[in-house]
Image: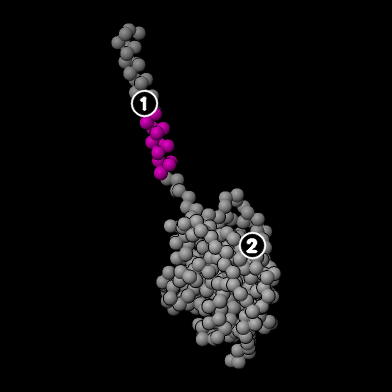
Amino acid sequence: MNQKQKTSMAIKIGFFVVFFIIIAFLILLITTLLTPSKDITNFEPSREPNGTLASSEPAVQPTSEPDGTWKSYSYDFAADLSDYEKYMNPKGDEYLTLINADNRLNENYVPSDLTDVINTRQDGQRNTQQLREYAAKALEALFIEAEKAGMTYVNSSSGYGLSVMSAYRSYSYQQTLFADKVKQYSSYGDDAEKMAATEVQYPGASEHQSGLCCDMHNIRSADTAFASQEAATWLKNNCYKFGFILRYPEDKTDITGISFEPWHFRYVGRYHATRMNELGFCLEEYIEYLKK
């Protein structure tokens, strides 16, 4: 092989080396672009059916005000609720997770600390309801104070006093409820599911699966008519003291995407509930505020 042939061979080899380097680079670039980034702004770790974490990744939520402040609020009650203080006033963000159509729970998520709600309505139509431990104990305190305030009175038109109708719901049960609601709106055709979603959350999008909310009222079934009851007004004006918020207010339906529910209360802890009350925010607004 003469010098000219050697030079030609070296050029060919160099060409193929450069060619393969370019191909490898393009493959790496395409792979990177096609791999979606993981948004963990409202990540809820998946859990096994027994409630244990299936992932070691933490739920990422803001923990305090944008400026980092935290205040321990305290209130005077007519009843002695000192034994319930730690349940009403936890520090941190464990109970702040945003759950809605855009932030859904895994279908296998089941809280590991479900506790009986002693204020379940005794009407022979439901099992004893359950909430996560801190929410259940804080709710007990709320009912003790509500009784002191005369808010557990029996509604003459229904024959029931203030009581819990529904709390924790499994993913599968929520599927059934949603499917039933879609059937009710079947006359709307393609819009039936959209209409149903304004009243019943999609499976995985319901706060009930979290074990952190409950439906409570003193009428026969959930209805906006409850808003006219004195007990509803008392709950709306005092629930934050016990760590609860009215989750779907009448003036926030455009933000929550859910119609007014004066019976639906969500546990977030006293600090966050008080701040939301002071700021006039629903949970979606508050989460955005904490991100700033």
- Mark nearest the camera among 1 and 2 is 2
Which residue is denoted by mark 1 in the rendering? Answer: 18
Residue 239 belongs to magenta span: no
- Amino acid at the residue labelled 1: Val
Q: Is residue 54 above or below residue 6?
A: below
Q: Nearer the viewer, residue 184 or 202?
A: 202
Q: Position of residue 131 (x, y in %)?
A: 64, 69
Which residue is denoted by mark 2 in the rendering? Answer: 111
Residue depicted at 61% across the width and 63% down the height? 90
Q: Could you say whether the residue bearing mark 2 is in a helix, strand or loop? A: loop
Q: Is residue 248 above or below residue 153?
A: above
Please state, as top left, top right, bottom left or bottom right, where the C terminus lies in the image. Answer: bottom left
Within 10 angstroms of label 2, few (less than 14), some, or many (20 or more) residues?
A: many
- Amino acid at the residue labelled 2: Pro
User: Quick check: 235 left or right of 288?
Assistant: right
Q: Position of residue 52 (x, y in %)?
A: 65, 55
Magenta-colored span: 21-33
